Amino acid sequence: MRRKILILLILNFFIFFNAQNKSNLSINSISLSTLATEYHKIYQSAKEIISKLMTTPDTKAEIKNYDFKPSGLSLNKSDFSLHTKSLEQKNKIHLNWVSDMNYNFSPGFGDEDNVFYRARVSSGLDWLALGEGSSKNQRMQNSLNERVRKIDLLEKLKYKKEISHMADLDQVRMTFDQKKISLLSDYEKILKLLNDFTINQNKNGLKNDAETAQSKYLLDKVSIEKKSLESLLKTEDKNTVTKEILTAEIPDLTPVENINFNALVKDKEFALKMEKEILDIKNKRDKQIDLRLKFRYNYYSTLSNDRNFASVGATINLPVSRNKNDIESENDLQAKKNTLQDIQTIYRDKLSTMFREYYLLKSEIEILQSESNYLQSELKVNSANEKSNTFSPAYYLATAEKFLNNQIQICDKKSDLYEKYLEYRMTSGTDYKTEGLDSVVNYDNAGQETYIWSSFFTNYSNTYIIDQMNHWHVNRVFLSVGKVTDMAKVADFMAMASENNIQVYRLIGENSFAKTDSGFVDLQILLEEAKIQGFTGIHLDIEPHTFDDYKTNIDLYAQRLINLFTNSKIWCNQNNMDLGVSVPMQLPAEVATALHNNNVMTYIMAYDVLSLDKKLNKTLTIRDILGPDYYVWVFRINDFTDFNDLLNAETTVQSEGVTKLGYYDLSQMNNFKP
């Protein structure tokens, strides 16, 4: 066998000599035998390296798509919720203690200088009732601060996404760099052996200096590239991307036509909405009257006698012009809003280009993988014939070099491919790792409570009603069974509601309970029924303000309501049931005080023809008495033209310290929300 290999090598050398047009050189058999042995060792070493590469998982059948692990970078819903703690400032009266002292020197510049007084001392309280420094102004400032904070949080979310994206890019690059270093290391071993062999050939006159320099260049090229990658490799970082990515199937991208481009600009829309609200609040604040009420104790010292007295007064400041900067800001916001459609077009064009480049690169990788299969077959067939008289190590080594270069190209292009994959996912909004804006910003309604009257309940299936409440995110409903005889439907409804985490209260809307002082006796019968039927709580909707004699007997009806609500609360506490009551905006303050003292959740029926600002002013007293934790602002759906109109109203009342919202009623909500 050794003799055959020696003969084959001699023939190869002879071919080399002729091809290079060299003069014949004398070489002894010992040197030739040494070179033949060395060349055979190079072949065996290369064969061992290539065999390991061909049997590693990297060249086996590919696994399914690689899933990137969630980064854990996200914002919570609480980050975007209103800070009610700061809104509690509205209950405080803003008073200032002001003192003023003045002394006139004598003689003065004129005779009249000392006519009125020689010295004056004035001290007392200033109440900042309206305008700058007032509690209302502070609430408006709190609202401004909330919106600025939300815009900042949007930026924070954007940065978190970019951090997550760059972290994944670094990990992908690290994984493929490690793989490439391994391939270059194998390639370097083979080239080093071939370079040493070429040097020996040169010494024996079988290779010229140019061929020797070329061999050294190929070795240096690979060595330098390997060292460069090793120096750039972030070995101190923990790589969270597993090596499965090296052999995973090439992932597909979400087609451009399937991307929701409206969602891509939702954060910008939300930021513009916040900016618009900030501007509206500023305009409203700048237009409000500055009112300062003053109480003073005054002491005057004159030439003839001293005197002291108390005084009251007021200072009023009413703006009459509009700031030019506000108008320019409104125009800027409108211009930004108009560019949102252009931004969507830019996103579409950018993603279309990325999509094209991605799949062109993917086809290049597939071609290289096909070449890899071909070269592996060549290597297997060639090595299987190594005992044949026609076997040539030179052909195997040349094919091995092609295979190594092929694997390095695949590694490089796959690294580029995954970088494009991650960029496309982030740009298109299909990156699931970072919690999206929809998860933390409420573009939907904020109310979670509603009413169902017996007519609507009878005419619709339980499944349909539950679906409607889920669509509106309702978690508490007040159900009036009225004269419903199908109690099986009621029981089934409560069971389905429980499965959907919806509390069901018995809605009792009988005004006659306020007709007499003994109304609770009749009401208690219905309370007992509700307990037997399994309701979670009771909701009372008793409206004596609808009576003809209400205005002339307000105090009487107020006391009857207090008795009804207080006794109902005692009964509910004894029977482990919750209690809520619906009240009009003109609720007497003493009734609100009784509800507050008994911790009864109060639902303010904020519906009539008044503007929202006037409704807020009208209910300010009872809202202050009840406190933000014990009242719910109830919108009547029919008061709004569309769903966005409702959302804007919600934002407005929330800026005034309203933290809980509800809707009247499910029949009006039906088909109203998109």
Image (tube, grey):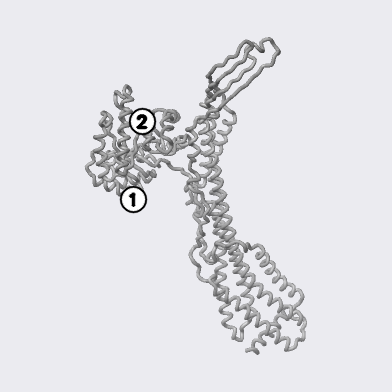
Q: Pointer 1: residues within 10 angstroms few (<14), some, or many (20+)?
A: few
**Which residue has dot 1 on it?**
499
User: Which image quarter is the N terminus in?
Assistant: bottom right
Whole-percent x, y for residue 93 in the image: 50, 30
- State left or right for residue 607 relative to residue 157: left
Q: Nearer the viewer, mark 2 or mark 1?
A: 2
Q: Is residue 16 left or right of residue 162?
A: right
Residue 644 in view in this figure? no
Q: Position of residue 298 (x, y in %)?
A: 57, 18
Q: Is residue 400 above or below residue 499?
A: below
Cα distance between the residues tagged 2 and 1: 36 Å
Q: For the residue labelled by badge 1, is the local secondary structure a helix, a strand or a loop? A: helix
Callout 1 amino acid: Glu
Q: Is residue 545 above or below residue 336?
A: above
Q: Quadrant of residue 650?
A: top left
Disc 2: CA contacts within 10 A as few (<14), some (14-19) or many (>=20): many
Q: Residue at x 56, y 78 (%)?
A: 380
Left or right: where does residue 84 sit relative to residue 2? left
- Picture coordinates of residue 53 (x, y %)? 57, 73
In primary-sequence order, the first of circles 2 and 1 is: 1
SS of the residue at dot 2?
helix
The quadrant of the rendering that contains the C terminus is top left
Q: Nearer the viewer, residue 129 or 391?
A: 129
The foreground one among 564 and 399 is: 564
Q: Which mark is residue 591?
A: 2
Q: How many marks?
A: 2
Quadrant in which residue 305 is drawn: top right
Query: Can you say whether 622 is above or below 268 in the image?
Result: above
At horizontal 37% and vertical 29% (from top left) the residue drawn is 590
Q: Amino acid at mark 2?
A: Val
